[in-house]
Image (cartoon, helix red, strand yellow):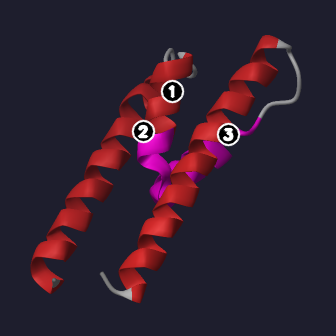
Amino acid sequence: MGKTEIIILIYLLVINLTAFIAMFVDKQKAKKHKWRIPEKVLFLFVVLGGGIGGTAAMSLFRHKTKHWYFKIGFPLITIVEIAMAVIICIKFV
């Protein structure tokens, strides 16, 4: 495994952990009726590669599951990103 692959894996680990933690924090703030993390920010973490963490947190914490655009959007973005990664790996590796 080369240096580039290690950097990509570290990035994906960090962005997925960030998405997971952001969903957890937003859920805790929702319970306490406090200031929330904007939905755009939660989606941004997922679009930037944090789909697995965001989707896992949504399911685990039962957070944002009543909103169709989260319930469908997070997993759909994740599937597209995984498919793109597989295609890139097949073509260039």
Return the residue nearer the eye: 8 or 43: 8
Which of the two residues, 11 or 45, is positioned nearer the viewer here? Answer: 11
Residue 88 seen from this side: yes
Is residue 52 magenta-colored? yes
Q: Which residue is mark 3?
A: 22
Identity of the residue drawn at 11% across and 81% down: 91
Q: Earlier in the sequence, mark 3 or mark 1?
A: 3
Q: Magenta stretch?
A: 37-53
- For the residues marked 2 and 1, what is the alpha-carbon distance in whole angstroms? 9 Å
Q: Which element is circle 2 on?
A: helix
Quarter holding the N terminus is bottom left
Front one among 4 and 19: 4
Secondary structure category for the residue under label 3: helix
Hey, which residue is sitting farthest left in the picture? 90
Q: Are marks 2 and 1 in contact (CB under 8 Å)?
A: yes
Q: Which mark is residue 58?
A: 1
Q: Is residue 68 above or below residue 23?
A: above
Asked if 48 appears above or below 16 in the picture, the reply is below
Q: Residues within 10 Å of mark 1 (few under 14, many from 20)?
A: many
Image location (x, y in percent) of residue 85: 26, 66
Residue highlighted by disc 2: 74
Q: Is residue 67 visible?
A: no
Q: Residue at x 36, y 47 (%)?
A: 77
Mark toward the start of the polypeptide (2 vs 1): 1
Residue 72 highlighted magenta (yes or no): no
Q: Position of residue 60 (x, y in %)?
A: 49, 21
Mark 3 or mark 2, whichever is nearer to me: 3
Are dots 3 and 1 in contact, CB under 8 Å? Answer: no
The residue type indicated by label 2 comes to Phe
Q: CA distance from mark 3 to mark 2?
A: 14 Å
